[in-house]
Amino acid sequence: MEASSQPSPARRIGALVFLLVGYFFYAWSWNTVDILRPYFRADFGLTLGQTGALYSLQAIGGICGAIILGQVADVIGRRNTLVIAMLGYGSILAAGVFLQSYSELVAQRVAMGFFMGAMYPVAVGIYSSLFPRSVRGLIAGIALAVYNLGVAALGFCSAAAFRSGLHWHTLLWAGVIPAALALLAFVFIPDDRRLKPVDTIVEVDATPKARFPIAELFRPAVARQTILLALMSGLNLFAYQVFTGWASIYLKSERSFDDAIVGDILGWQFAGAALGGLLWGWLSDRFGRRTGSIGFLIAASIIPVYLFAPFPVALVKLVGFLYGTMLSASAIWGPWLSELYPPHLRSTAASIYNWGRGLSMVAPLVTAPLAEAFGLGPVMVIASGCFLLAALIWRTLPETIQL
């Protein structure tokens, strides 16, 4: 298909706004497995291990979706794949109100994970095709801010629901919205297969393309880079799951906060992450994609304070807000990954981020028995070491912004 020129600025902004709406509800949907974890446990009568395994199962689906649908997006178009993803995750989330057994909950989480696994690589591929390198970090920061606003909204809405006596199932009906909006992608988002690559960093080599796009990420020239990126992502997502994934249960069971306070604390944490996405995105456009490694170092130092300092609720909210801000240093990984490889691999390259879920999905399975033996606090502090190691790897990888 012959490439066409870039759409008007108004069309590009409209496409970004639509994409961010889908991203907001993707964030809401993905994080129901964490924010609503205590209520899954109570309603389905689950053990701590079974409750933690729900994330692992969703992550398995996410890895499969990222690998399969990320490559599909680079073949049939990212806009078309976005439609498939929004229809899939939205309808399956809403169907969660009808689940009656743990086996049905397992199936739902795997299926949701599959479609949600496409959202990150597809979104990166779309906005990297529409916007130049000089603003991609900020665009990525906006995307992560919207993602975290979605999680914050889930936290605040869960608190409001409990205060008003509504059942937590009410929060699952939000899936109807992205499913209903999905087909409007054909109206708002240009066909990426017809767009010329914007501001390419990596030269397109003359080597014939592999049958499967993912194979190109393991060519000798870039195989080490690909492996380190996947490991760095895995450490980040493992740390996130060890700390943030258990936060709701820690606050409820170890700190004895009521449901409404737990929702508020988590809401402020993700509000901080929304602000952090904008901050780190802006910094990366001006000082380089590796700047965010500083945020990981600060996050590693904040975690023990959050867990062991005997702070009142107001200070727990503040420390959680700061942690969320530092956690969002990974905001710029999307454009960075797309800049490290040729433009025809943008979605496949961005899917490397989700490969890290292969490591993170074992986090609940490993930490649940440790938490039962030693308590959640000592186990959750493992996240500090993971963020530290991820930051060190980050510093060794190539920079794509010329300072």
Image: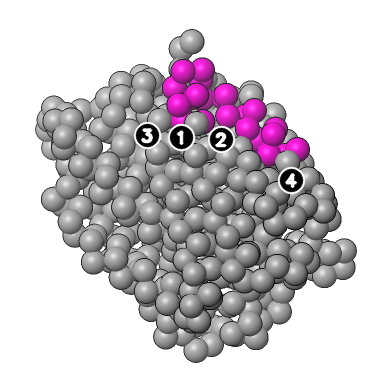
Which residue lies at the image location 31% right of the left edge and 37% below the top edge?
127
Residue contact at pointers 3 and 2, CB within 8 angstroms: no
Does residue 42 appear to the left or right of 106 in the view shown?
Answer: right
Q: Earlier in the sequence, mark 4 or mark 3?
A: 3
Report which quarter residue 89 is drawn in: bottom left
Residue 211, percent across and down? Answer: 35, 43
The disc label shown at residue 303, or none: 4
Give how far apart the Cα atoms at labels 4 and 2 are: 15 Å
Q: Which amino acid type is marked by label 1?
A: Leu
Mark on residue 329?
2
- In the rendered image, which residue does mark 1 sit on? 278
| Along the viewing direction, whichever of 281 and 348 lies nearer the viewer | 281
Amino acid type at mark 3: Ile
Q: Secondary structure at mark 1?
A: helix
Instruction: Let me know if residue 129 appears in the view.
Output: yes
Q: Is residue 84 magenta?
A: no
